């Protein structure tokens, strides 16, 4: 079995983010690392983040930093990855790529404890960079074993660069078997100095620091500040510098935080202006504090920590000089906030000068958090995301998101719509023209859109085409003639000869071709004076189905090509040159009569915004009556057609329209759903829009909406813009109450049953009560009159939102053995919850399945496995485990508890098997039947080495995955085969009778298959070998499964599912990961494809090695050698290569670059 791996949606979780001027100039940009992807983002004027460039580095990005050389105008990026190399990148604005400026190898590849790459620190003047490992062995004085917690550069002006680190020496703890030395181990803050003259690092100064210290923040030095570092420790922030007394302040705590919980800082950002600087520190609960230092000649006199705001917990924060805060969230959506103030108003503040020491320790400072102010607000994949208050069910549809700008009712059902400018040089459109069956409506575009009657258009007839012709004239084509409206108001009319009517029309800015009934073509051109002149007539053999003229090339007076589609299933290219006017240049036969034609010119680009070099190309697109879009390349000299591709879009014949996307021509195809074809990073992408069926469309540009589309459907006129280009999925998020664990489909009504549970939280009712108290306290404090209602309605605040929304503020924390959990039934069509059952008494749900017990009267029942009072330390201690059985009422919309059965462990896996219920309880697999008061045990197997986490069944076989050791196949609860390699399973899926797919916690996906002879033997002899099989306990089962596929994804896979995403597409295995990416594994159907793609992958590995220096083959084989999987993400980088490299690889494969791109497009279209 050979598979093609393709990432459908890139990871969205952010590991690290930095900001700076990477493209030069004054622009503020953000570089984010999303696991194995490096992206450059820029906030636009509207406060939206635009992705300028995104590249997969085929490695694991562990740390990012930016630096600027002294006197330079732009920032460079330093990347610490798992390649054992340090890489310095520069963003190349012209080519829109990251260029590798320098690469230094210093260690082995892989994420290792002692190989640097985990931590990066930059000298603030850009002279040196320090790269550190989690653990390092120093050979400068004596060999000491230290664990590193954080490193940073110390700002000491232009003196020798100094780096600080928090370290813990564990050499004594290693020697001491009693454990006393480990308890007494002490963290130290150490300064290292780099002597620039000697190129030598020496340990300059070391001092004990709190054992809770976890993070360092550089304090500006030189002429800007006092230098030194802020040490963020549990409950404290301490200012430290060599030869300076400690300045310590306590971090304010939430009033409702249990006393045993500490407060740790998890992310920090600093902002420096000429006269002042401040730091923003965020705690693990999401609260942001503004830290300022008061300093003079004698050093720092005071450290102030003031409550600033509360936002969801971030992995990284960046303060941009343009007044934005970019927050890369740990869970849930990332956000871009705008600063309204920098926290100069009075608020809860903790000062080093007022630090009080009592017998129990330092006196804490309490505060109440507040909400943010001024906030602005096909086949489907269902995915559970997020945790705690930011949990959601996301419905993903393979399509682009639409943002609707305006919707208005029209007086009838229109047949077509156009937009026109008054002059070629205008930035925005002047009119929207709507055609009805017997009239034409003209709307002018301004502050509002209103009907006008003095435009010169004939409004008593339907229109066939409306466009700008020449530089400043308008043209209206109607069935009886052409109306040419000059800028000064003069109107010229051309009438059709006799009773013949115009049926089709094609035009560009300077040429017009009309087709009369019967098949006669008449060609007009705009002459030097701006008049429309008849040039040539031509009789076709039959009626014309559709027409289009190619756009006029730059610097030319006319375009040479006219495309004519006929009802005899052909498309002809005719010449419009004066020398051979109306001569047929080439003919293309198609599978069905063409309904619509459109030429699309792609201008030549070197690098450019899409990061790829490609020559100018002219594409002819045809929408055929059988619903297929046919695309072919037109030779720009001879007009010959080549390299044709087709794709089925829907049941209706696609109508094609030219629209502008990011300033470039794109194609809008309206079939039974709308599709957009556009070029993104060198690839031509054809993606559906998540919008209803449209009849006719035109591009739309006004000062409110620069790149929009105006369209008609029924009697409604719609204006919309297309968002987030380059993304595969458009998502709808439905918020959930607690962290979702599993979900199943209710079989009859296709409703979703979701189980949610959270550790260490309060139930919704307890939270509401606590919040009310909080409001009352805040109401008394803030408004002085205790007016609770006023406070609940937003008080003095403009926004009427909940001032303490859980999503921003997080849930209040409770003891670790307290669980909250609920079972929810959700209708995905209306996104409504039809039933929500809260579990009581710290009981939490962990597994769920639907089960049909045979010969029972209830039909499909719901089984839910729960645990009460579960704690992970000591290992999995719990009060009791239960299996609840519910019946569905009201057509599946609500639940009724039948009974619950107590079990001895946590039921982590449930599955139906031959009319009974299989449960994996700890390491026991048990079969239950339904009784009146409880479940009845029928059979069990205790021979599992570890906790069972997944069960799948098929016919009389059971496929069991456990947490750490083996994957088992079972037959009548006798183990007959298992896996050779012990793995920690995170997901598994049953592929066929003998095959299972699995994923482990190190980011590998693999397929195992039972050898054919073993499979046959078991089927033939279901009884004979059982006694023999039972003896396989110590060394596992007597038979072993073979691994047929191995691949390292580079991200922990949390779920696997088999699906087909497009009608008529191939079935593939979809996977979702912790970082939020979705990918697919598609089986190859022909040996030729396997050969082609494996050779392409081999050449790409050699000619285009990954950006951060990791070897691609080694990355994909990080734990096990890669086996029979082609990396589609690497192959899809082919269009971004320079042209000469594309040709070189294509020659090796005996193909042209165009053919390789066609193959890449074809295989992508099989998946999505």
Image (cartoon, helix red, strand yellow):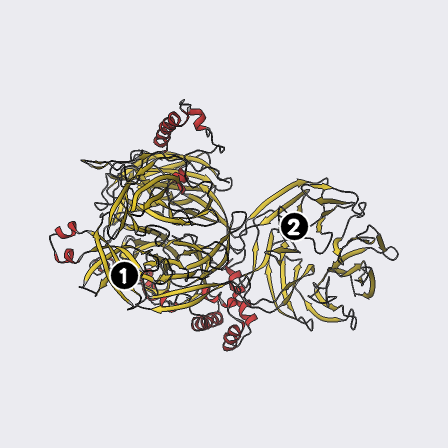
- Does label 1 or label 2 sit earlier along the sequence? 1
SS type, badge 1: strand
Q: Of the residues tagged 1 and 2, which is closer to the observer? A: 1
SS type, badge 2: loop
**In the image, is 493 to the left or to the right of 944?**
right
User: Which one is in front, 667 or 650?
Assistant: 667
Quadrant hosting residue 507: bottom right
How many residues crowd mark 2 within 10 Å: few (<14), some (14–19), many (20+)? many
**In this picture, is 1089 found above or below 673?**
below
Q: Which residue does the numbered mark 2 point to in the structure image?
A: 701
For this orientation, the residue located farthest to the front is: 297
> Is residue 382 visible in the rendered structure shown here?
yes
- For the image, the number of numbered tags is 2
For this orientation, the residue located farthest to the right is: 498
**In the image, is 649 to the left or to the right of 1164?**
right
How many residues crowd mark 1 within 10 Å: few (<14), some (14–19), many (20+)? some
User: Which one is in front, 207 or 365?
Assistant: 207
Q: Position of residue 890 (x, y in %)?
A: 46, 34
Measured Cα–Cα span from mark 1 to mark 2: 59 Å
Q: Position of residue 1128 (x, y in %)?
A: 46, 64
Q: Label 2 near label 1: C-beta < 8 Å? A: no
> Is residue 981 visible in the rendered structure shown here?
no
- Give residue 484's mark: none
| Residue drawn at 82 percent across, 66 percent down | 536
Quadrant placement of the N terminus: bottom left
Q: Which residue does the numbered mark 1 point to in the structure image?
A: 193
**In the image, is 917 to the left or to the right of 482?**
left
Q: Position of residue 1048 (x, y in %)?
A: 37, 62
Q: Position of residue 570 (x, y in %)?
A: 70, 65
**In this picture, is 271 found above or below 895?**
below
């Amino acid at each position: 079995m050979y598979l093609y791996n393709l990432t459908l949606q890139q990871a969205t979780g952010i590991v690290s983010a930095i900001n700076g001027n990477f493209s030069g100039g004054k622009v503020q940009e953000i570089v984010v690392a999303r696991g194995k992807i490096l992206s450059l983002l820029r906030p636009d004027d509207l406060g939206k983040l635009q992705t300028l460039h995104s590249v997969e580095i085929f490695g694991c990005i562990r740390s990012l930093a930016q630096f600027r050389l002294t006197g330079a105008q732009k920032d460079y990026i330093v990347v610490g990855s798992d390649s054992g190399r340090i890489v310095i990148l520069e963003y190349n604005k012209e080519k829109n790529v990251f260029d590798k400026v320098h690469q230094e190898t210093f260690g082995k590849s892989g994420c290792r404890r002692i190989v640097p790459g985990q931590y990066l620190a930059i000298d603030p003047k850009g002279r040196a960079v320090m790269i550190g490992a989690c653990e390092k062995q120093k050979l400068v004085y004596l060999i000491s074993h230290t664990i590193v917690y954080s490193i940073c550069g110390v700002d000491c002006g232009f003196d020798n660069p100094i780096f600080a680190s928090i370290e813990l020496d564990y050499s004594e703890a290693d020697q001491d078997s009693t454990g006393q030395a480990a308890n007494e181990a002490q963290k130290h803050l150490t300064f290292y100095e780099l002597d620039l003259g000697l190129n030598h690092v020496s340990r300059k100064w070391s001092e004990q620091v709190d054992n809770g210290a976890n993070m360092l923040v550089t304090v500006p030095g030189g002429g800007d500040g006092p230098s030194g570092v802020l040490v963020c420790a549990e409950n404290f922030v301490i200012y430290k510098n060599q030869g300076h007394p400690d300045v310590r302040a306590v971090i304010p705590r939430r009033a409702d935080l249990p006393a045993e919980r500490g407060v740790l800082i998890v992310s920090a950002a600093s902002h420096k202006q000429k006269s002042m600087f401040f730091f923003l520190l965020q705690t693990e609960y999401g609260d942001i504090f503004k830290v300022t230092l008061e300093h003079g000649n004698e050093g720092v006199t005071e450290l102030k920590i003031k409550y600033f705001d509360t936002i969801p917990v971030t992995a990284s924060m960046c303060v941009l000089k343009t007044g934005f805060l970019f927050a890369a969230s740990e869970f849930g959506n990332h956000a871009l906030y705008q600063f309204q103030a920098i926290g100069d108003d009075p608020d809860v503040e903790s000062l080093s000068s007022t630090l009080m020491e009592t017998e129990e320790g330092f006196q804490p400072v309490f505060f109440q958090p507040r909400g943010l102010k001024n906030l602005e607000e096909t086949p489907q994949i269902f995915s559970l995301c997020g945790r705690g208050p930011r949990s959601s069910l996301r419905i993903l549809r393979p399509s682009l998101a639409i943002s609707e700008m305006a919707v208005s009712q029209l007086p009838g059902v229109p047949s077509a719509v156009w937009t026109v400018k008054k002059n070629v040089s205008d930035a925005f459109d002047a009119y929207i023209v709507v055609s009805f069956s017997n009239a034409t409506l003209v709307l002018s575009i301004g502050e509002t859109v209103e009907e006008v009657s003095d435009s010169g258009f004939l409004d008593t007839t339907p229109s066939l085409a409306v466009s700008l012709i020449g530089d400043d004239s308008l043209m209206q084509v109607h069935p009886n003639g052409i109306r040419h409206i000059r800028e000064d108001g003069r109107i010229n009319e051309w009438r059709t000869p006799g009773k013949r009517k115009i049926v089709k029309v094609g035009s560009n800015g300077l040429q017009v071709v009309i087709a009369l009934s019967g098949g006669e073509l008449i060609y007009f051109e705009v002459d030097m004076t701006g008049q429309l002149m008849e040039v040539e007539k031509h009789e076709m053999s039959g009626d014309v189905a559709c027409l289009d003229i190619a756009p006029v090339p730059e610097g030319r007076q006319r375009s040479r090509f006219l495309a004519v589609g006929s009802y005899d299933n052909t498309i002809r290219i005719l010449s419009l040159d004066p020398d051979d006017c109306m001569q047929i240049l080439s003919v293309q036969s198609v599978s069905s009569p063409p309904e619509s034609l459109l030429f699309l010119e792609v201008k030549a680009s070197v690098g450019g915004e899409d990061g790829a070099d490609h020559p100018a190309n002219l594409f002819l697109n045809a929408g055929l009556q059988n619903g297929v879009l046919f695309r072919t390349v037109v030779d720009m000299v001879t007009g010959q057609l080549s390299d044709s591709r087709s794709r089925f879009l829907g049941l209706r014949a696609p109508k094609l329209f030219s629209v502008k996307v990011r300033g470039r021509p794109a194609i809008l195809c309206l079939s039974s759903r709308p599709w957009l074809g556009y070029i993104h990073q060198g690839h031509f992408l054809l993606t559906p829009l998540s919008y209803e069926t449209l009849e006719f469309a035109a591009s739309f540009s006004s000062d409110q909406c620069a790149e929009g589309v105006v369209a008609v459907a029924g009697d409604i006129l719609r204006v919309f813009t297309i968002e987030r280009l380059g993304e595969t999925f458009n998502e709808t998020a439905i918020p959930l109450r607690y962290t979702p664990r599993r979900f199943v489909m209710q079989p009859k009504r296709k409703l979703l049953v979701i189980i949610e549970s959270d550790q260490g939280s309060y139930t919704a009712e307890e939270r509401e009560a606590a919040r009310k108290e909080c409001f009352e306290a805040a109401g008394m404090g803030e408004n002085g009159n205790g007016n609770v209602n006023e406070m609940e309605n937003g008080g003095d605040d403009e926004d009427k939102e909940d001032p303490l929304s859980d999503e921003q503020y997080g849930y209040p924390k409770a003891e670790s053995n307290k669980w909250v959990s609920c079972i929810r039934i959700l209708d995905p069509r209306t996104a409504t919850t039809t039933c929500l059952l809260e579990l009581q008494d710290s009981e939490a749900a962990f597994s769920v399945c639907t089960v049909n017990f045979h010969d029972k009267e209830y039909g499909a029942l719901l089984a839910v496995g729960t645990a009460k009072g579960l704690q992970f330390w000591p290992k999995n201690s719990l009060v009791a485990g239960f299996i609840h059985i519910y019946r569905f009422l009201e057509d599946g919309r609500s639940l009724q508890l039948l009974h619950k059965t107590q079990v001895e462990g946590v039921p982590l896996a449930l599955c139906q098997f031959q009319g009974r219920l299989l449960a994996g309880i700890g390491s026991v697999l048990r079969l239950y039947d339904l009784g009146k008061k409880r479940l009845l045990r029928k059979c069990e197997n205790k021979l599992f080495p570890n906790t069972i986490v997944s069960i799948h069944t098929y016919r009389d076989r059971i496929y069991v995955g456990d947490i750490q050791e083996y994957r088992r196949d079972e037959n009548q609860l006798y183990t007959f085969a298992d896996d050779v390699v012990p793995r920690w399973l995170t997901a598994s899926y049953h592929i066929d009778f003998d095959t299972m797919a699995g994923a482990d916690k190190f980011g590998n996906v693999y397929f195992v298959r039972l050898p054919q002879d073993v499979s046959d033997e078991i089927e033939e002899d279901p009884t004979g070998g059982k006694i023999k099989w039972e003896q396989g306990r110590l060394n596992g089962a007597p038979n072993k499964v073979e691994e047929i596929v191995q691949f390292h994804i580079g991200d922990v896979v949390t779920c696997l599912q088999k699906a087909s995403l497009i009608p008529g597409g191939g079935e593939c295995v979809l996977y979702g990961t912790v970082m939020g990416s979705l990918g697919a594994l598609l089986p190859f159907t022909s040996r030729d494809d396997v050969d082609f793609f494996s050779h392409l992958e081999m050449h790409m590995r050699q000619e285009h090695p990954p950006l951060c220096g990791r070897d691609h083959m080694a990355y994909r084989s990080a734990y096990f050698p890669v086996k029979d999987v082609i990396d589609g993400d690497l192959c899809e980088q082919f269009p971004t290569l320079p042209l000469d490299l594309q040709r070189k690889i294509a020659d090796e494969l005996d193909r042209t670059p165009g053919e390789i791109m066609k193959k890449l497009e074809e295989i992508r279209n099989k998946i999505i």
